């Protein structure tokens, strides 16, 4: 018999037991649909985190350069006491690798240079670097709409068209130049100054649907309309006339007052007369940055021209930053943000930064580990779905065994007229393959329907206020093809025993079988 004859015979045999075949196929459908649904959820999670969230933040072309104060804080966070840090050398003497008396070096070796403006400019001249900017953040009091808050302030360059935070504006534009008295604010700024009421705030967080309510409760058009209302309005920064000092100390190290980063009441700073007032006009409003934030100071709510932010930073240093500077004996920047022209330049640029005497970090260096984690997650989800398909394989074996009992006489006749054991086995393997193919194909379709339904319900009822539609499930072509092939493979494995049993049927006894 040729392959066409075998397939035709297998189809005829399956059609003669329609109910049993249908129930067996349904078992495969359930197993394949479970695999597709669970694995597609894992792939969707991976796509949302790596393909969308991180890509929007441009982390694949971003390098963070650490100054000495940042490394000091890392050492302190690892459990080293203040006295240990003070006694340690800024650059440990190198020791031969084969020296038996050598001691392990610091986990976070200190930069050999100060991360100042000159160093940032030098980093920016490295081949493959698009731009390099110091991370300038501080907190200060500001007055807006008759209320005073203490907020995070950041600095950004003027005229840099591809600066990530300035790519999307709800209203307005970026500031005109480094010397302009203009500022860009975020949606969190609007929410912080929303009208206060018993139903609008809880634990200092605005809520409700009133003016300037948090962005998730409003549509895109409403957010843009609210943002347009503040364009051109003025906000006042209250900058102390001299650098803040304090007699408080940690590990014997002078510290400034550890006041909260943001106050949620309408109180004004003590001795307001000792503050200079700097008026800035709101030029633009940008959307919330989202849940992923790599800035150790938190997301700035107000962004000023870089040069003005640098000037004001000297009078409003973050307590953590001051601690790092005191420990390191270094008044340079804690961090610098470096952008490369494309992800392939990450490694070469990081090597050059290290040669300049700084430590560098990029999320791309951790991508292998991140992908390994997602591989484990997807494999675990697929294994759970595979259990259902394994159960279905017992149904396939049962169907084949029952088929042998019903077709014993037919098998005997086939052998009597010259049918070989191999041809008998091929018939059963083709029947199993057809069951796997039908169940796998229908299972992929069922999984797709379940994914679409679940995704629609999730976007409607769970994240209905998100700024854009979220795809929780992802079914790439290789998942569909792999699921169908896996179903066929499991079906063939399940048919091995029935096929071998059919091949061993004695034709003489089979012809006598009733």
Image: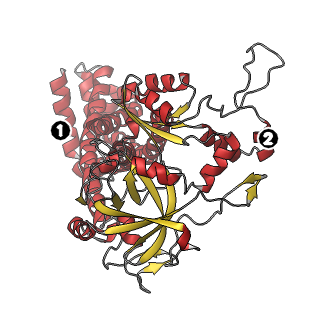
Question: Quick check: 170 left or right of 87?
Answer: left
Residue 450 drawn at (x, y percent) = 29, 56
Q: Where is residue 194, by image quadrant?
A: bottom left
Residue 202: mark: none
Residue 84: mark: 2
Callout 2: few (<14), some (14-19), or many (20+) C-alpha neighbours within 10 Å? few
| Residue drawn 28% across the image and 52% down it | 174
Residue 197 drawn at (x, y percent) = 41, 85
Q: Nearer the viewer, residue 386 or 143?
A: 143
| Residue drawn 19% across the image and 32% down it | 9
Q: Earlier in the sequence, mark 1 or mark 2?
A: 1
Residue 12: mark: 1
Residue 196 drawn at (x, y percent) = 41, 82
Provide the secondary structure element on which disc 1 rests: helix
Asked whether the residues under the numbered discs 1 and 2 touch, taking CB atoms below 8 Å apart as contact, a structural biologist would say no
Q: Can the viewer see residue 36 in this picture?
A: no
């Amino acid at each position: 018999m040729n392959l066409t004859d075998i397939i035709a015979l297998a189809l005829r045999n399956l059609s003669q037991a329609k109910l049993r075949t249908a129930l067996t196929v349904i078992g495969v459908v359930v197993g394949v649909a479970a695999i597709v649904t669970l694995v597609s959820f894992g792939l969707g999670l991976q796509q949302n985190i790596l393909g969308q969230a991180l890509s929007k933040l441009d982390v694949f072309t971003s390098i963070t350069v650490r100054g000495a104060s940042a490394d000091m804080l890392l050492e302190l966070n690892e459990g080293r006491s203040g006295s240990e840090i003070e006694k340690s050398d800024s650059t440990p003497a190198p020791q031969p690798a084969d020296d038996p008396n050598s001691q392990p070096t610091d986990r976070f070796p200190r930069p050999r240079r100060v991360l100042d403006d000159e160093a940032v400019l030098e980093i920016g001249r490295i081949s493959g670097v698009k731009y390099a900017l110091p991370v300038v953040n501080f907190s200060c009091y500001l007055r807006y709409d008759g209320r005073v808050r203490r907020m995070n302030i950041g600095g950004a360059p003027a005229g840099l068209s591809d600066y990530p935070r300035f790519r999307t504006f709800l209203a307005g534009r970026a500031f005109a130049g480094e010397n302009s008295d203009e500022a860009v604010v975020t949606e969190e700024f609007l929410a912080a100054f929303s009208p206060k009421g018993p139903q609008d705030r809880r634990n200092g967080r605005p809520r409700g649907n009133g003016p300037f309510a948090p962005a998730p409760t409003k549509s895109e058009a409403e957010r843009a309309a609210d943002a347009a209302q503040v364009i051109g309005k003025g906000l006042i920064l209250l900058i102390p006339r001299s650098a803040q000092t304090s007699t408080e100390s940690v590990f014997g190290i002078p510290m400034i007052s550890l006041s909260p980063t943001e106050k949620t009441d309408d109180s004004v700073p003590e001795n307001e007369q000792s503050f200079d007032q700097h008026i800035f006009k709101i030029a633009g409003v940008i959307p919330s940055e989202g849940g992923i934030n790599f800035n150790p100071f938190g997301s700035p709510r107000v962004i000023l021209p870089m040069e003005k932010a640098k000037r004001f930073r000297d009078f409003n240093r973050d307590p953590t930053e001051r601690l790092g500077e005191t420990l390191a004996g270094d008044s340079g920047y804690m961090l610098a943000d470096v952008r490369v022209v494309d992800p392939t330049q990450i490694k070469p640029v990081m090597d050059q930064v290290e040669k300049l005497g700084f430590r560098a970090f990029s999320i791309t260096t951790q991508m292998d580990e991140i992908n390994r984690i997602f591989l484990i997650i997807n494999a675990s989800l697929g294994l759970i779905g595979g259990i259902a398909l394994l159960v279905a394989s017992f149904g396939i074996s049962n169907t084949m065994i029952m088929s042998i009992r019903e077709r014993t006489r037919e098998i005997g006749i086939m052998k009597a007229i010259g049918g070989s054991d191999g041809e008998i086995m091929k018939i059963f393997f083709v029947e199993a393959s057809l069951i796997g193919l039908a169940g796998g194909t229908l299972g992929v379709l069922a999984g797709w329907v379940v994914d679409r339904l679940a995704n629609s319900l999730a976007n409607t009822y769970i994240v209905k206020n998100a700024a854009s539609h979220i795809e929780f499930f992802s079914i790439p072509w290789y998942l569909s093809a792999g699921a169908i092939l896996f179903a066929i493979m499991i079906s063939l494995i399940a048919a091995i025993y029935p096929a071998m049993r059919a091949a061993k049927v004695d034709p003489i006894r089979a012809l006598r079988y009733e």
